[in-house]
Amino acid sequence: MIPPAVEPPDGPLPYFHALWKLLDNPIEAWPRAVYEEPFYQRGDERQTFLYACDPAMLKDILLDKVEAFPKDWMFDRVTKPALGEGLLTAQGEHWRWQRRAAAPGFRPDNVAAMTPAMVAAAEAALARWRERGEGARLDIATEMTAITFQVILDTMLSGGEGIDVEAAARKITDYLETLGKITPADLLQWPTWTRVALAPRGQRAMVFLKAMVDRMVERRRREPPRGDLVDLLMQAQDPESGRRMDDVLLRDNLLTFIAAGHETTALALTWSLYLVGRDPETAARVRAEVAEVAGEASLTDADVARLTFTRQVVQEAMRLYPSLPLMSRMCAEDTEAGGHPVAKGTFIFVPIYAIHRHRRLWRDPDAFDPDRFAPAESAGRPRFAYLPFGGGPRVCIGQAFALTEAVAILATLVRGASLEPDPGHRIRPVMRVSMRPQGGMPMTLRLR
Ligand code: HEM
């Protein structure tokens, strides 16, 4: 089965066309060479851009020479207004101590303990769907966002008391659609405050979200600890400097976990359900696996660990439609990557979407085939050919959490319902920091 893909242009687009694509859907500007060559370099005397696809080059950029390739100023402009100097955005020592502080919250035993909350959120969604009835039309993208938001609140923030889930989800969408993408102010390199001032909807969303989390932090400082991520971060102390997180840094990090931790997983699930909905054979295999592992019972963390085929479906969905289709870096010193010289100041694109469909790295790159993630076929694959969670020291801290969550929820939903894609809806993957289906994902509910 070949699901919809971005059709790359044969060569670089003319200037104004490229500019428009950059604002509309940047992936559609990546030329075919990005999918076919180990790297693709362009630029003029002012700025060079390097699209890195060769796993050896990526290993240098993300792991072996990570100090030479920090996060870039464009990333800062898009993320820092909302997320300040939290874990996703900080660099150097300020990043390192925050990573150490947050890591225990994502240990495998902690993730396993959170599985029941993930399963419960999926079962609650199924119950809501049953009330809507057979044949109901659902926007699966919105449904998945509601589920994963609830999971983040329940698992990391002890239920997120005082947080209005619907309002918060709406505001996050407002931010992503305005300030969460490259704007004309960025291309013109106007000061960062101008991009905020020119996007009142995004600015209002940001103020709302910060105030919401500030209220939570203030309340939690007064209350006894509950042993969740909020407590972990409040108590964290840098062993070297002795510093702790003040209220602003705490808020930046909680917003980071809320923002980075639910939309990405919601999209992985949305694309997984779309692909399963289009492929009855895969749907049948997932159902058979769930029946064999758990029968009719609610899934436990041990069950989820045994759902190997369902996990392969999620991995394949994230290959074809990575929630984050692009990472970027800046080259901070003259160096080389994968044996290729890279000059200081070069803007580095890690085009995850194209790497995952690269002609030299994958057989039938555009085909949906979960079996490619079976152990035998995965064994010889270079680590840096598959990067849905990034790689190196800045690899996603929530990787195990997200995979467990996606597998638990997909298995629960596919067992309880069939979802049929709407044949009249054109699927167009668009990049808004994350990779979303434009206009949502309408699907028809068939109860089981
Ligand atoms: C399917 C779901 C997810 C995907 C595809 C995903 C993807 C990514 C990627 C690609 C990065 C690296 C960014 C870079 O290096 O530029 C990243 C970093 C990060 N992710 Fe995730 N993520 C997911 C789920 C989560 C969850 C559930 C959480 C937390 C609850 C989370 C929190 C973070 C944080 C805090 C970072 C920054 C880590 C650091 O720089 O030390 N993510 N994620």
Image: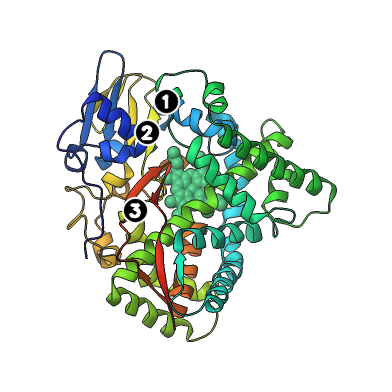
Residue toward you, 228 or 129? 129
Crowd around label 3: few <14 · some 14–19 · many ≥20 (10 Å): many
> Is label 2 in a helix, a strand or a loop?
helix
Badge 2 vs badge 1, beta-carbon distance below 8 Å: yes
Q: Is mark 3 within 8 Å of ligand 1?
A: no
Q: Name the residue under label 1.
A: 184
Crowd around label 1: few <14 · some 14–19 · many ≥20 (10 Å): some
Give the spatial CA distance, label 2 vs label 1.
Answer: 8 Å
Mark linked to residue 23: 2
**Residue depth check, mark 2 versus mark 3: number of the one nearer the observer:** 2
Mark linked to residue 321: 3
Q: Where is residue 240 in the image (x, y as percent from the top left)?
A: 66, 32
Question: Residue furthest toward the front?
Answer: 424
Can you say whether 251 is above or below 231 in the image? above
Three-letter code for the amino acid on which mark 3 is drawn: Tyr
Q: Where is residue 86 in the image (x, y as percent from the top left)?
A: 60, 36
Tell me which numbered mark, 2 or 3, is placed earlier along the sequence.
2
Q: Position of residue 41 (x, y in %)?
A: 23, 28
Can you say whether 226 is above or below 312 in the image? above
Badge 3 vs badge 1, beta-carbon distance below 8 Å: no
Three-letter code for the amino acid on which mark 1 is drawn: Pro
